[in-house]
Structure formats: structure tokens, C-alpha cells
Image (cartoon, rainbow, N blue to C red):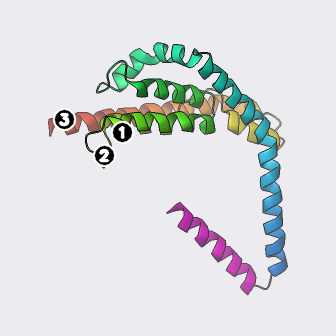
Amino acid sequence: MVTKIWVFFILSGSLFYLFSGNVSALNEQILKGGTDGLKLLFSMMPLLIMWSGIMKIAEDSLLLKKFAKVLRPLLRILFPSLDSNHPALGYISSNIAANLLGLGSAATPFGLKAMQALQNDNPNKLEATEAMVTFLVLNTGGVTIIPTTVLALRISYGSTNPSAIIIPSIIATFSSNIAGLLYDYCKRRKKRYE
């Protein structure tokens, strides 16, 4: 669906430039967009590589497993249908840790592994379990303490105070997470009483 939307935008913009007689402006925008994209990629890459490396070191040094043990009581409340030693809980903890650091790209592999572990126990492979839905809500809301990617963007575009986003980011992500988890909890309770 997203691909269709992007194709529509690209085609409609290109047709507008063609019919308005601004083919040279279209060529300039294509080259400028590519150049800007590469500049952005190269300015963000060092920060993302550094934090991804830190996450890998934390995983290899079993620091993420220790973090998972700290989170286990909370995860047991959020995922009552899972056994306390379920392999998905470790991946969920790692996903939360990466999201706390604002590393969506580093959180994604852990999220995929968590969903795969949850899907292995799913009796109906065509329908998401309660644990899968809760994890999706938790991952989407993703509480972020250090919005690393946004900080990198603000630094690359010359922000005078790139860290000004930290407190609003914490408030916004914490609020969205609480709202999403409350809604998920209410829907689960309602479904059980039907």
C-alpha cells in the first residue's frame, strides 16, 4: 500500500513538472534529492553505527539478558499468557532497550525475533495472539529516553539546541505507550467477558 502511495506522489509530481514545462526543474530536484539523501545518510551513519555497536556489545556481554531479568516482572504483567522463561521475553527486552535509546533500526531485528518466537507458539498461524498484539503496541509506542536518530537529524541540519527534543520525546513516547497499553488491556478484558 505504501509503495502505491509513493508511486502516486512521484508520478503526479513528475507529470506536473512535465505539463508545466519545467523539465529542467524536475531534473534538478531529482539530483538535489539524491544528493540530500546521501548527505543525510552519511551524517547519521556514524551515530547509528556507534549505537548499533553498543547494542551488539551489550548483547554479546549478556548485558541485555541482565536487563531482561530486571524487566521480567513488568513483562510478566504485560504478557500474562507467556511462560516466565519464554524466549520471546528476552527479545522483547532487547527491543525495549534499543527503543529506549531511540534506535529503531537496532530494535527491528529484536522485534522480528520476538514476533517469530511468539508465532512459533501460535495455534492459529493466521491470527495474532494477545501477546503479539501487546508487543506490537509496546513496540509502536516505544518509550524513548535518548532519541538518537532525531538528535542525529537535528545535529546534521545545524540545530542550535539539538537536545531540546529529549524531554518532549520522553513525554510523548511515555504517554503514547501508556495509552496504547491501556487500550490493549481494556480490549483483552472485554474480549474475555464476551
Is residue 126 visible to us here?
yes
**Horizontal and vertical percent position of residue 78:** 36, 25
Which one is in front, 5 or 162? Answer: 5
Please report contact status of discs 2 and 1: CB closer than 8 Å, yes or no: yes
Give the residue number, with chain letter if any, for mark 3.
192
Q: In the rendered view, tell whether residue 111 sits above or below residue 74.
A: below
Mark 2 vs mark 3, CA separation in Å: 20 Å
Please report contact status of discs 2 and 3: CB closer than 8 Å, yes or no: no
User: Residue 138 is drawn in which quadrant?
Assistant: top left
Q: Of marks 3 and 1, which one's residue comes earlier in the chain?
A: 1
**Residue 119 — which label?**
1
Mark 3 vs mark 1, CA separation in Å: 21 Å
Q: Quadrant of the C terminus?
A: top left
User: Residue 131 is drawn in which quadrant?
Assistant: top left
Which one is in front, 65 or 191? Answer: 65
Residue bounds of the magenta highlight: 1-19
Q: Of marks 2 and 3, which one's residue comes earlier in the chain?
A: 2
Which one is in front, 105 or 166? Answer: 105
Give the residue number, with chain letter if any, for mark 2.
125
Q: Secondary structure at mark 3?
A: helix
Mark 2 vs mark 1, CA separation in Å: 7 Å
